[in-house]
């Protein structure tokens, strides 16, 4: 007889964030050692049967397998019992931002309760989803509040009494199928979603710890992923732009592979010896790479490969730079992050093309002093920012309990997959 699972208080679990990307499912566990300090406990990656394309879950059963495997590997490494829930990073090609607001007249001046703020947030969510049934609200970020006609950045405090309260949010919206697929994947895996976290918000949380001034000065975050690039422009308390571009670092891999190079060899060459432009090479050299047939080899030079990369960069970065033009003079910095941002010479390639200062996102302030150097890499910024948001959420909801998915929900997901009705 199957042992009945019990409801669990999240405070008894390690912090865990999952990132569903085109290279598979990444999972990171950490503990909070101070308000803004994390100690990384473990990291695992499952890329079996990867079916996440441009941020869209193409097959929930395959993703469920990877979710289970990544969490199982984490638990094995930490020598703990199975973890029933995790936060998940959401993004995807359909993601965009829209402003939304809700208002309430309390009739008499009184405290604005947390319950009322939750109602206002839910009302904003319903406004969007009722008007656009094909869209789902991935997350809501508070921008500002108007209390009795006076604007303030923070929600009204417990010692502040107001009659009229207006809450303004930035809503991150995306294809409803994305949210349904992610939910179905977790149900099939027998896991619960602790919290959905928006990737741009996770990155901003990670970088603001090291450079708090960027919140007021304004910044753009360019998340250079494998199959997509996400550009977010933030200033003050608002997102001015969020746009997902349908090309990432794999486009550079394809540019190399198109010259009779095996795809896996092209990817390895890009990551280990690739340079954003021949102009940044100190000296040239020749390399022998596996040909596309996997049997013979092809000899290429570093300058040739850098030329192919630069040609493709010119193509995929053109719309990004065009989108940034209206914000020149308005924001202080462009922060590069994501696995693709580690391409040699990328910063030097981009800086002459914009008047905005270009740099790398830095999440080092969030890591404990004894942290291994590996975790300072930009490819982990979104996970670490997500862990901080997840820790805040857990502290703000101390009495929350996690219930395992019902068997009927898991069975429903299986039936949907068999008949193909939940394919995007």
Image: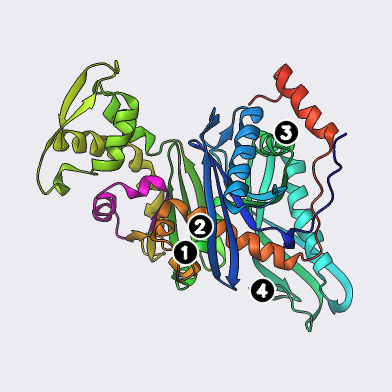
Q: x%, y% of residue 273?
A: 23, 41
The crowding category of the residue bearing disc 3, from other C-alpha atoms within 10 Å (few below 14, some 14 to 19, many at least 20), is many
Residue on which the image places disc 3: 188
Viewer-side label of 4, 1: 1
Residue on which the image places disc 4: 154
Residue at screen point 78% across, 65% down: 117
| Distance between mark 2 and mark 3 Cα atoms | 28 Å
Check contact, mark 1 vs mark 2: CB within 8 A: yes
The residue tagged with tag 4: helix, strand or loop?
A: loop
The residue tagged with tag 3: helix, strand or loop?
A: helix
| Highlighted range, magenta | 335-357
Viewer-side label of 3, 1: 3
Residue on which the image places disc 1: 207
First reached walking from the N terminus: tag 4 or tag 2: 4
First reached walking from the N terminus: tag 4 or tag 1: 4
Residue at screen point 38% across, 66% down: 332
300 horizontally vs 225: left or right: left
Check contact, mark 4 vs mark 3: CB within 8 A: no
């Amino acid at each position: 007889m199957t042992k009945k699972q019990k409801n669990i208080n999240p405070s008894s679990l390690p912090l865990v964030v999952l990132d569903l990307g085109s290279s598979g499912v990444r999972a990171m566990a950490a503990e909070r050692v101070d308000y803004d300090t994390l100690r990384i406990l473990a990291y695992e990656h499952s890329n079996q049967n990867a079916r996440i394309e441009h941020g869209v879950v193409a097959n929930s059963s395959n993703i469920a397998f990877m979710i289970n495997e990544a969490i199982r590997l984490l638990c094995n490494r930490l020598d703990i019992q199975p973890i029933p829930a995790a936060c998940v990073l959401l993004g995807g090609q359909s993601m965009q931002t829209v402003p939304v607001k809700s208002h309430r007249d309390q009739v008499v001046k009184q405290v604005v309760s947390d319950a009322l703020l939750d109602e206002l947030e839910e009302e904003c969510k319903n406004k969007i989803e009722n008007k656009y049934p094909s869209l789902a609200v991935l997350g809501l970020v508070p921008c500002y509040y108007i209390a009795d006609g006076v604007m303030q950045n923070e929600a009204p405090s417990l010692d502040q009494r107001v009659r009229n309260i207006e809450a303004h949010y930035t809503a991150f919206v995306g294809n409803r199928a994305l949210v349904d697929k992610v939910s179905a994947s977790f149900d099939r895996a027998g896991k619960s979603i602790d919290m959905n976290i928006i990737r741009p918000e996770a990155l901003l949380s990670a970088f603001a710890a090291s450079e708090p001034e960027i919140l007021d000065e304004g910044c753009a975050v360019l998340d250079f992923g494998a199959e997509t690039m996400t550009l977010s422009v933030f200033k003050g308390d608002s997102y001015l732009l969020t746009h997902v571009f349908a090309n990432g670092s794999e486009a550079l891999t394809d540019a190399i592979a198109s010259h009779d190079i095996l795809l896996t060899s092209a990817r390895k060459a890009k990551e280990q010896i690739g340079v954003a432009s021949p102009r940044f090479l100190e000296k040239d050299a020749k390399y022998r790479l596996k040909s596309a047939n996997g049997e013979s080899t092809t000899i290429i030079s570093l300058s040739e490969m850098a030329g192919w990369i630069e040609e493709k960069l010119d193509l995929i970065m053109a719309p990004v730079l065009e989108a940034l033009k209206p914000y020149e003079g308005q924001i202080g910095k462009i922060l590069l992050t994501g696995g693709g941002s580690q391409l040699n010479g990328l910063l030097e390639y981009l800086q002459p093309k914009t008047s905005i200062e270009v740099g790398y996102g830095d999440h080092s302030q969030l890591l404990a002093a004894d942290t291994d150097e590996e975790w300072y890499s930009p490819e982990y910024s979104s996970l670490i920012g997500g862990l901080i948001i997840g820790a805040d959420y857990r502290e703000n909801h101390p009495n929350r309990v996690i219930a395992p998915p019902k068997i009927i929900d898991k069975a429903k997901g299986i039936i949907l997959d068999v008949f193909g009705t939940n394919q995007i």
